[in-house]
Image (cartoon, rainbow, N blue to C red):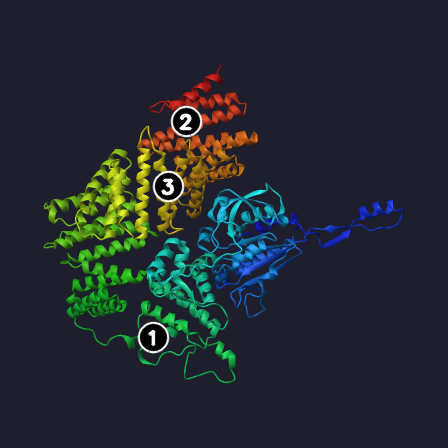
Amino acid sequence: MPALTAPLELRRALRPLQRYRPAAPPLRRTLDEVATVELSARAGGLIIPVFRGVSRADALLQFVMDASSSMRVWERLFAELQQILGQLGVFRDVRVRYLHQGPDGAPAVSRSPDPAAAPLSSADRLSDPTGRRVTVVVSDCAGPLWHSGHAHRLLHQLGRQAPTAVLQPLPQRMWNRTRLPVTYGVLSRGEGPAGAVLKVGGDAATASAAQRPGTLAVPVLPPVAGALGAWARLLSGTGAGRISGAVAWVRADQQPTPAAGAGDRLSSFQLVSRFRSAASPVAGQLAVYLAAAPLHLPVMQLVQRAMLPDSGPSELAEVLLSGLLIRSKEGGADDEPWYEFADGVQEALLGPLGREEAVLVLKHCSAYIEQRFGRGGPNFPALALARLGDARHTPPFPRGTLDEDEPPGDDEGEEAEDRRVPHPFAEVAARVLERFVPLPEQFVPAAAPPLNAAVESARELLAQFESDGMVQDLIDAVQLLRGATEREEPAAFDPRLWAEFARCLLRLWEVQGGGELLSEAERAAERAAAHPRAVREQAVLARVLHVAAADRRRGDKRGALELLRRADRAYTVACAAPGLDPAEALRLTLERVRALEAQWRLGGDTALLQGAIGMLEEFADARPDQEHRPPGLPLAHGRTLLRLSGATGDTEQAQLYAGQAARSLREALAPGGHTVSGRARILLDLVDALLLSGEGLDEAWTLVEQSLATVHDERLLASLRIRAGRIRVARYERAGDAPRPADLDEAAEYFALATRGTVRDSRAHADLLAEWGATLLTRAQLSDGADSTGAAVRVLRDCRTETVAGTARQAERLLMLGKALMLRHRVTEDRGDLREAEHLFWLAAQEARDPLTAARCWLELGRSHLDAHRLLHRPARLDDAAGAFRDAAEAARTAETEPENPRQFLEAVELRAAAHHWRGTAYEEAGRPRAAREAYRAARTEWRRLPDGGGGTARLTSDRLAELER
């Protein structure tokens, strides 16, 4: 499959390079016939040839690929780009080089990606003091040369002499996690040969890295037509002369990355959690599949093509650079890289892998073995079973051989050596099959204990697993109970056996994952609950159905809802069981509440939350002694009320629910026994309730201030700082006629501190950037807020980069970034900001999912078009503005017909009135008084629908209409 989806567009985008001319004198000359004739005529017939330099196609392109192991996945992309650049006819020659780490750690270049296949030369050979060489380095900026700083120094050396750029194939959201982070700004040609040294403006020029002496800006480009086309226009001097883009700052004395200390190493759980929070969904799924395969690059690519055919090298690169893998010291015979998972990572990743998927991965790996090592050797499952048998009954499996008794003959030589299956294939296959494939009969115990003994033994094994964490104990319990159920006589049916079997299967699924385990647990629980006398067994069925619904909700929302309704019915029966222990009754009640909350999340019915609250209050009323009331009860009550407050459209009712939630959460917080982190989480919910209730800001601030002094966990600290920022914003908004801008400044500082404890490129980090950017935008809109515009643009630009395309929040964040750019444009009169804001408003309007947001976007787009007309004096912009205002009015009219609450209805009316008013302004400036009068009349009609009649803007509408009607 091609790596570039639109090669023709890329070729067209690079055509401006045909006008690129190096600053050095041309190397080639050709006869100038006209000048020769004229000079010869003046010389009285003596022929004097005149030559002129030929500068077209005089430049040379150095196309350099980083040869680090993680770049192997981009070889096809490199080859396709090389072909496109060679076919342009722009350069005298396209020289392909590969950048290696030399024996002394310094950068070296060769003509081959394999350092042993071609001689290595010093990277200084890439230098060209004449400035004729344009250098493009293709790299993910994560290899050893980047960690040592050698790559940065090489870029600095090349960039001082001639145009140099880095082509970064990774997704842009990952760029700032590499060793070459970027900032965004406005680029233009600067000093040096052919403008080699760029001029940088905007946010990139104010970045901390740019302020250090001796730094050099190097453009960083994604392999897409838009970015490469803009770079080509900048290089050739065509177009507007200024482009928006990403730059990296490099130094001639770049220091190596500090080595991680022993205390900085993350556990396997932390590594996997960090990866899942930051990776794309496809990359996360690919990592799960690769946990069942040998980490040999060709095999990894084969598994990716087979299991995720719509994915590309970027997803595989995310896995390679995730920190989950380490480069193996054992190399293959084909010199392709081998990897290993960090300790404990493979077991954590195998959890979500289903049995069917595992078998399919094994099948594709078996096909690779047949192709690579021949059909004479065993297939992948057979190899694994042989490995299992050797592990229990025979000496260890020898590395690199399939059969110790039949060594290769002398006549086979190295060919036989190459056909030996490497040790990791058998090792990985054995581990996967131990989890998913039933053991051969020779490994099954010959006899099983009696039924009652089987249940007791299984419970002991389960307790042993919970104590020691050995998964084998849990597997043994499941196999023991499975055998007991298979041998059970129909007349001796025991629901306790089936309930225990379902409970152990569910616990094994929680550890390993897999749809087959969960389905088997569901069948066992239904079998147990079907018995006429089964009552307590209903609790197991309810729990299994609850978990199955959570597992199914992404792909089958309707099916998940049905499972949750069945779980609720089973919880109802289980809670009514006679003689139920109070602790068990509380646990079942809290589980039922969580099931109702899950139904609400899927269906949006707030009556489910109200039912859960009533259930908790009924449970509490049955235990009037508050001193002996379980502490989990007020905590669940408060959190459910808090969710109901956030889901209620009526503002007054939402504040009432939030006040009740605050009272219950105070009660939950009062007793001792909480850990520091547990107390902090309850406190976070209490602060959220106080903020939503509209009261208690002082109490909320005191609680947050106290916790900030005691909590040391970085994530909890980040959450507390976010709440501190929200409290400051709320103080500013509720200050009435005397707001304090200092509250916004302090809030921005807290949000900035919170980013340190939030994982980058995660949804939480993007949400935090949006909240921080909104605060800076509010501050920038004040009369003395000009100094905040740059920070607002920078933060909101980062927020846009980290927001996943197509999400519901994208339009609002594009809108905020556009507003920040317009504010900065009005301060600096930078036309680049104006053009970018126009584009962002248009993009936001296209992305908006609800008509109210779309109306805001169209309105801001129209205002930006008006500003562009006043700056550029182009009448066409007035027509564009009128069209945008018309779209805004139409979107607001749609929003009026489907408001979620009265506040949204009034906002829609106000937006529609404003859109008509601004449309009248556009027509008036265009010299169309009749159309302007019609628009102003429509605006006046809408203003009159508002309770206050529209205020000052409505009076302005009336004044303009009266002026036009004279």
Cα–Cα span, label 3 and label 2: 33 Å
Displayed quadrant of residue 531: bottom left
Please, which residue is most extreme toward the right here? 44
Assign a secondary structure to mark 3.
helix
- Establish if 398 lies above or below 860: below
Assign a secondary structure to mark 2.
helix
N-terminal label among 1 and 3: 1
Cα–Cα span, label 1 and label 2: 76 Å
Residue pointed to by mark 1:
388
Q: Amino acid at mark 3?
A: Ala
Cα–Cα span, label 1 and label 3: 59 Å
Residue pointed to by mark 3:
748
Residue pointed to by mark 2:
913
Q: Amino acid at mark 2?
A: Ala
Assign a secondary structure to mark 1.
helix
Observer-side mark, 3 or 2, equals 3
Q: Residue at x 52, y 34 (%)?
A: 829
